[in-house]
Image: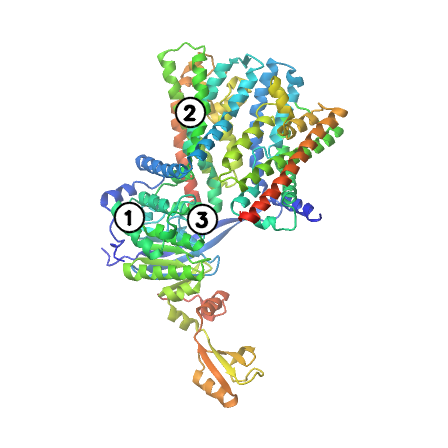
């Protein structure tokens, strides 16, 4: 064994950098690099069967586009639902589904955390020099997930020109902004619900209420739902900020809850707070796991 | 014949051994029920009496679909798939029992457990919050028969999809297509009575209608007398056809395994 | 600066879990389970240490604390001079870990891709990676299955792949949790031979938990035994045999089958035709027994067997040695 020995000291800079990285969400640059690297490896592996990959992507697109078909069927019977026209509801569908699809592609596999805990595969991840969140989020990353973007992008592109909105620069700018903050809110929800599984390993079935349930709920106008329910998804779990509040601004509509006008622009702030909470929850959950070894 | 009831009983026990996970699923099914019910109420407010349903019918239908997600396994899947992929199915094929019969018994036990753990919560929660119909004793009896037939049809469909793993390199595409068909044509996405024109006629004749739409209509008392018998016969015919197809496909799979070694 | 800090320094390390038990219909009682109950030891650079104990004794918990997966409840722990739980990712770059029961490779990727990925994760530069990969490929005979997806590898191949993955970044310390479990004889021999060379030629410190005593006899110069969360023995194999005072075994083959022989202080454990197995306590002089036997019986063949490590441990785990129960502190 002629290879130079392992005892080579880590370069000082690297060691110092690593020291500043006690948890997983720290050092975003390195996390992003690692995310891309791991995801790319999976994509390359899947690309060895290109036909299968494309067909799977299309099948995935079909599954996730089903909700849009459902909405179209409703509007085959009535021009308005809860005061909203088909293009308006499809606009809500498009923004919500696009934000959710993006978050699902990036972080969806975190919902399997409880299973990793149960199978013990979490331990194998913890002995690698990369944050746990990055590893779980890229586990089995498949390009077929990109199929989820197709129906949402398509519906959004079809709905936007049909909206009866008074387009201003602010309203146009709001659309990418609301998708971005919706993505961040969903990301926070994925991580929060995954963190719960550190403690309650069997809770996955219930946390789907927030992730998939949240995605489904925000495809429809909130005016459909009971007022107290809407208060709940505004103030307790801020699903209303994914697309409803900014959409009210874009569509020039009054808020049924009568929240002040600033609420229409609060989505980025809400997203930031939620992501902060998610980071704390993740660290707490990981610490809990490492002290209980559940 | 004696072994199948035991297979079903063990499946029931295995499925109900960890009620927490099922309870969590039931919670999510209920939440989705609330959202879907709100959407349907808005639609029926705009179009009262649509498809011969009143608002309470539509809401009840919605919570029935949520309650039946587990028992008829709308989202697809079977444990057998994994056994085919890793080759363990060879063991099953050399048992002195029929492969399809064994897994059917297993599935019936699972469905019974699932009905218990995942069916009750959505129905009760829906009934407490929204206008809701409960069936009379005769309706409940007919519903039990219809759900059993629905589970048979669901099994028949999933068994066929699962057996395709013998021939496919990657079964996930097949699973995804099966999922779309199941979600859409069983009435999960929107009730089949809302499907317009020809689409509705076709959808009501497909086997997925026998999974949820028919049991729900039986529950709601939409079929009476000979109509009820016709609805149950519709389910039974599909169940028999699918199980017969499954039988043929099992034979082909066995030959493939014997001749090509899997 | 201290002279030569140990690779692993554990001082009074403990880990307790809270276990909820159902007691009665709804009531649950919480009990505290001390999985590791105050363990102290030092492993120096270049050592090859076997870490033994019956199931549930605290082996895996110790390993998980050493690798930073679990945080100790109390005590101080240093691995490569780092606190494992606090500096997990930094430590991960300096140690290699192999779990025999589960792989750290990616199931769906070919082994080669898994190893490339590991290079990137551990930030090994390309040239060093090429040299090490070539070397590991030769030593572990990976070439035939480098392009096979991991899920299709046999257990022995997978374990060799896992070993390569754990060593690609040139770790100073290798922690192995039952690496030979379930392997066939040939794979076991390959793995053992490899570990031995790794330790002697490259100087990598190795800590090995195993139930396979062949591993211990062949590889470990030092053995630590944990039982009920406490370190019950720490020392060389020879000293273990001597300390426990394990009995030797005398196998005699007589000219013809007969009843068990009768000798003072000797117990006949088994007879099988003309062959008899006699337990020989340490205090008894073997030569005296042999001559006494030869006097009374016609002896065809005779052989003396040293205490088998397996028996030594079986005795220890059963707790039928006074030493075991005395709780006397063990000297390193």
**Crowd rating for badge 3 (residues with CA inside 10 Å; few <14, some 14–19, many 20+):** few
Up the image or down, C49 lies above or below B141; here it is below
Distance between the Cα atoms at labels 3 and 2? Answer: 41 Å
| Image coords of residue A76 (percent x, y) | 56, 15
- The residue that mark 2 highlights is A182
Foreground mark, 3 or 2?
3
Q: Residue C163: in sight, yes or no? A: yes
Question: Are discs 3 and 1 both within one chain?
Answer: yes
Q: Is residue B156 left or right of residue A268?
A: right
Nearer to the camera, B10 or C273: C273
- The residue that mark 3 highlights is C152
Q: Is residue C167 left or right of residue C230?
A: left
- The residue that mark 1 highlights is C129
Write the residue at 48% across / 83% down: C301
Question: Are discs 3 and 2 both within one chain?
Answer: no
Foreground mark, 1 or 2?
1
Disc 1: which chain?
Answer: C
Nearer to the camera, B233 or A192: B233
Distance between the Cα atoms at labels 3 and 1? Answer: 25 Å
Q: Earlier in the sequence, mark 3 or mark 1?
A: 1
Foreground mark, 3 or 1?
3
Question: Are discs 1 and 2 both within one chain?
Answer: no
Furthest residue in direction front, as rendered: B259
Identify the image quadrant of residue A187: top left
Q: Residue C66: in sight, yes or no? A: no
Q: Quadrant of the C terminus of chain C?
A: bottom left
| Image coords of residue C150 (percent x, y) | 42, 47
| Image coords of residue C270 (percent x, y) | 55, 76
**Crowd rating for badge 1 (residues with CA inside 10 Å; few <14, some 14–19, many 20+):** many
């Amino acid at each position: 064994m002629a290879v130079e020995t392992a005892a080579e000291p880590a370069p000082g800079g690297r060691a110092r950098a690593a020291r500043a990285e006690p948890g997983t969400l720290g050092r975003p640059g390195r996390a992003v690099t690692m995310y891309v690297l791991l995801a790319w490896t999976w994509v390359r592996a899947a690309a060895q069967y290109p036909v299968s990959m494309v067909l799977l992507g299309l099948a995935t697109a079909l599954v996730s586009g089903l909700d849009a078909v459902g909405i179209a069927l409703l509007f085959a019977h009535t021009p308005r639902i809860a005061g909203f026209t088909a293009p308006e509801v499809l606009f809500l569908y498009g923004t919500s589904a696009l934000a959710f699809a993006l978050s699902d592609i990036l972080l969806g596999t975190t919902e399997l955390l409880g299973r990793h805990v149960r199978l013990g595969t979490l331990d194998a991840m913890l002995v690698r020099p990369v944050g746990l969140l990055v590893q779980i989020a890229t586990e089995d990353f498949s390009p077929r997930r990109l199929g989820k973007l197709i129906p949402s992008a398509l519906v959004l592109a079809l709905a936007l020109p049909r909206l009866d909105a008074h387009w201003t620069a602010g309203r146009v700018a709001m659309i990418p902004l609301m998708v971005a903050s919706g993505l961040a809110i969903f990301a926070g929800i994925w991580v929060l619900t995954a963190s719960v599984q550190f403690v309650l390993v069997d809770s996955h079935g219930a946390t789907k209420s927030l992730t998939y349930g949240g995605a489904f709920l925000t495809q429809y106008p909130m005016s459909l739902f009971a007022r107290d329910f809407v208060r709940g998804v505004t103030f307790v779990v801020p699903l209303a900020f994914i697309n409803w509040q900014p959409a009210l601004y874009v569509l020039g509509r009054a808020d049924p809850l009568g929240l002040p006008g600033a609420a229409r622009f609060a989505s980025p702030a809400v997203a930031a707070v939620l992501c902060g909470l998610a980071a704390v929850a993740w660290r707490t959950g990981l610490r809990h796991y490492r002290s209980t070894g559940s | 014949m004696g072994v199948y009831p035991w297979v079903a009983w063990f499946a029931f026990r295995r499925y109900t051994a960890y009620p927490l996970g099922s309870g969590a699923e039931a919670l999510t099914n209920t939440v989705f029920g609330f959202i879907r019910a709100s959407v349907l109420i808005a639609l029926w407010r705009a179009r009262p009496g649509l498809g011969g349903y009143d608002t309470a019918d539509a809401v009840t239908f919605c919570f029935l679909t949520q309650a039946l997600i587990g028992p008829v396994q709308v989202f697809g899947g079977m444990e057998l798939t994994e056994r085919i992929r890793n080759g363990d199915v060879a063991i099953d094929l050399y048992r002195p029992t029929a492969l399809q019969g064994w897994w059917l018994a297993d599935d019936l036990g699972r469905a019974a457990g699932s009905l218990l753990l995942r069916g009750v919560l959505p129905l009760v929660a829906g009934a407490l919050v929204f206008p809701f119909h409960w069936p009379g004793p005769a309706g409940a009896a007919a519903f039990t028969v219809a759900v059993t037939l629905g589970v048979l049809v669901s099994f028949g469909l999933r068994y066929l999809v699962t057996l395709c793993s013998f021939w496919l390199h990657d079964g996930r595409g097949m699973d995804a297509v099966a999922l779309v068909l199941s979600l859409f044509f069983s009435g999960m996405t929107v009730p089949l009575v809302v499907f317009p024109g020809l689409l509705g006629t076709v959808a009501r004749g497909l086997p997925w209608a026998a999974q949820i739409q028919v049991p729900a209509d039986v529950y709601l008392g939409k079929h009476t007398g000979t109509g009820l018998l016709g609805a149950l016969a519709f389910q039974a015919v599909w169940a028999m056809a699918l199980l017969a197809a499954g039988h043929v496909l099992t034979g082909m799979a066995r030959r493939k395994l014997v001749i090509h070694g899997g | 600066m201290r002279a030569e800090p140990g690779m692993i320094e554990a001082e009074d390390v403990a880990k307790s879990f809270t276990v909820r038990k159902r007691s009665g219909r709804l009531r649950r009682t919480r009990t505290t389970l001390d999985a590791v109950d105050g363990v102290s030891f030092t492993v120096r650079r270049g050592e090859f240490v076997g870490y033994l104990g019956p199931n549930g004794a605290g082996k895996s918990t110790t390993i998980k604390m050493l690798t930073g997966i679990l945080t100790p409840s109390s005590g101080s722990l240093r691995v490569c001079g780092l606190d494992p739980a606090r500096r997990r990712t930094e430590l991960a770059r300096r140690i290699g870990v192999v779990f025999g029961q589960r792989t750290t490779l990616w199931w769906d990727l070919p082994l080669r891709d898994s190893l490339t990925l590991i290079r990137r994760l551990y930030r090994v530069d390309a040239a060093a990676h090429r040299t090490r990969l070539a070397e590991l490929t030769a030593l572990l005979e990976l070439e035939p299955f480098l392009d096979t997806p991991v899920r299709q590898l046999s257990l022995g191949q997978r374990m060799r792949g896992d070993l390569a993955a754990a060593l690609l970044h040139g770790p100073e310390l290798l922690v192995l949790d039952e690496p030979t479990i379930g392997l066939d004889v040939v794979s076991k021999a390959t793995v053992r031979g490899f570990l031995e060379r790794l330790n002697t030629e490259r100087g990598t410190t190795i800590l090995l938990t195993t139930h396979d005593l062949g591993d211990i006899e062949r590889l470990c110069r030092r053995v630590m035994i944990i039982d009920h969360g406490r370190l019950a023995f720490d020392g060389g194999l020879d000293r273990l045999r001597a300390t426990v005072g394990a009995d030797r075994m005398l196998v005699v083959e007589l000219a013809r089958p007969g009843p068990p022989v009768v000798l003072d202080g000797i117990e006949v454990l088994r007879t099988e035709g003309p062959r008899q197995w006699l337990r020989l306590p340490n205090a008894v002089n073997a030569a005296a027994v042999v001559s006494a036997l030869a006097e009374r019986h016609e002896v065809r063949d005779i052989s003396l067997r040293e205490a088998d490590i397996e028996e030594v441990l079986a005795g220890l785990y059963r707790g039928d040695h006074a030493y075991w129960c005395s709780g006397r502190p063990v000297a390193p």
